[in-house]
Image: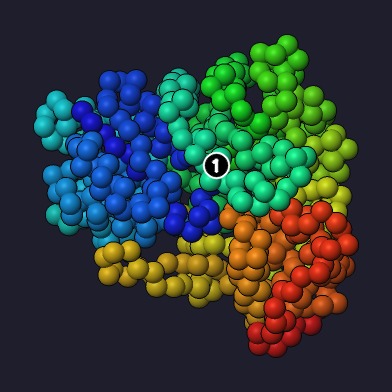
Amino acid sequence: MKVLLVGPYDPSKGEFSFHAPPLGVWRICGFLRDYGIDCRVYDPNLHPDSYQALDTFLAEFNPAIVGFSMTSLTLPYDLSLVHLAKNKYPETLCIGGGIGATFEAETVFANSPVDYCLMGEGELALLHVCQSLEQQGRIEVNGIPGLVYRVAGELKRNPNPGLSYSLFKEATYSLPYKDMPVAAYWEKMLSPVHKEKLSPQARDERLRDIHSVRLMTSNYCPMQCSFCSYTDFLNTANSGCTVKVVRLSSQDIMEMVKKISRLYLDIKTLIFQDDMFVHKGDDRIIALFGEMAKCRENGTIPKDISFIASCRVDCMNPAYLAPMRQAGFRLIGYGIESFSRNILREYGKENIHNRITEVLEATLRAGIKPFIDIILVSPYSQMEDVVYTLNKCMAYINKGCECAINPSVMPLAGSKMAEDPALQGLIKYREVEIPRTGIMMKRGVSIQPQDALLRDFLATVEQGQRKYFHYFTTEFGVSHFPSRLRSLLFILAATEAYPGFFDFSKEEILSKILAMVGAYDSPEQRTEITLGDPLVVAGNSPGC
């Protein structure tokens, strides 16, 4: 049995996806291989012509099943690959999976020639599909977990209870890291600026970020933030019933860390991709940090390897931070979302407000860099909430933090906000073509604020941010805009359009940007560039 798995297709070069091999797709691949299935992965983001490359792959490999991993953000492009595969090879069974197929199965079936969808985790479900097809020559729909299929024009769904601890561990251990095109992504992110203009020290810093490998140690985050769809990904697949949180043990995690470091001798950073790596009362994690420090010291893993993880501030015990630093953690991502209590209340995270300052300051004191995730504008926010949060972001950036600013809430299918009837009138849509098909889809772009002045603010600043993307691409050869750089460009546009509103200057932000892209050696030169015509504020200039 031959199976081809296709990763999510992001032609935007990283706007909609992480610059790395699709970890979930490769985990399914390794799991199926362990059961004797000839499974391969096609990554459309690594080819100049993704359609021609897929056509060639299908012709040469001739799989019986093609599984397409879909996300809400890449869905139109994912569906275009389904059309190509089914139109050129009609006998091939095409199956949609991932978070896009879980929450938007109706959309997938209505806009593509897909045969089935799979909800939730795909390892066991796709194994059952393969076994059914091989043993019976057809898909026996009953009993396949997560299968979505049509009966007389209606969609039927089988619940998917999720992987047990033993199966989750088995799937994680089966990840074929040795076959994953990690090095291809490393090379893709090393722009001409990195290669030619940076000093050796600055280049080493860039390589520490680029030469990274990801690992998932838990199945999902159960915290139910209102803007998040992933928190209900497995529960939705299980017919709305709550799926138990599954986490690898400290011993399991260490085994995977050792495996990855043996395979990638040039690895600089291992990223724990979990939304919440540390849980409340998570004393088991102390043993892990101790073992990591011991292995770095005795050379079992590289002495210079560093680690990145994410955590909620209300789950982080400051007592964990010193052991984390000793273990090699250099950055912790915190989903702060906003420094405004009003906005946090909308996001279902008001209870973190009193912990933000304590945890960020403790993390800095421990010598670990906090990475602050922000969703700047909420549906009911006011200008003072936004100004306050941007000022706090810059204050923490100046203290040594990094920041990722998402301008507004994305209406991700499956999230509470996207499905809230009271917010439907605030969702901004656009018509998007499924490439090469002529089929148009209506896709939610953002949930706009009720306040008209804030809508003008977003329109103006996002326009300026796009201008700066173009400028730094054409003038400095920047090929990859990581979130921290995108965020500084957003702040730069805000200071240009709304001078006097913030506690920082345009020149201060510009200096940080130019230092980040490695444009010049001399600080005196860093503001001597031309950014083009000044931004014109949309609508009426807001008052604070």
* For residue 392, side relative to residue 144 (left or right): right
Residue at figure coordinates x 18%, y 54% from the top left: 87
| Residue 71 vertical position relative to residue 263 in the rendered view, above or below | below
At label 1, the amino acid type is: Glu
Colour convention of the picture: rainbow
Q: Which residue is mark 1?
A: 187
- Give the image location of residue 64, x and y in percent: 19, 36
How many numbered marks does the figure carry?
1
Spot the residue most to the left: 137
| Residue 183 vertical position relative to residue 44 in the rendered view, above or below | above
Mark 1 Cα-neighbour bin, 10 Å: few <14, some 14–19, many ≥20: few
Pick the residue in front: 335 or 272.
Answer: 272
| Residue 263 vertical position relative to residue 488 in the rendered view, above or below | above
- Give the image location of residue 5, x and y in percent: 33, 39
- Give the image location of residue 128, x and y in percent: 26, 30
Residue at figure coordinates x 25%, y 45% from the top left: 56
Spot the residue most to the bottom: 540
Quarter of the figure with the C terminus: bottom right
Residue at figure coordinates x 61%, y 28% from the top left: 266
Q: Is residue 453 visible?
A: no
- Give the image location of residue 334, x and y in percent: 71, 45
Pick the residue in front: 269 or 156.
Answer: 269
* For residue 359, side relative to residue 304 (left or right): right
* For residue 292, side relative to residue 182 (left or right): right
Residue at figure coordinates x 53%, y 22% from the top left: 263
Quarter of the figure with the N terminus: top left
Question: Image quadrant of residue 522?
Answer: bottom right
- Circle 1 sits in a helix, a strand or a loop, which is it? helix
Spot the residue most to the top: 298
| Residue 397 vertical position relative to residue 333 in the rendered view, above or below | below
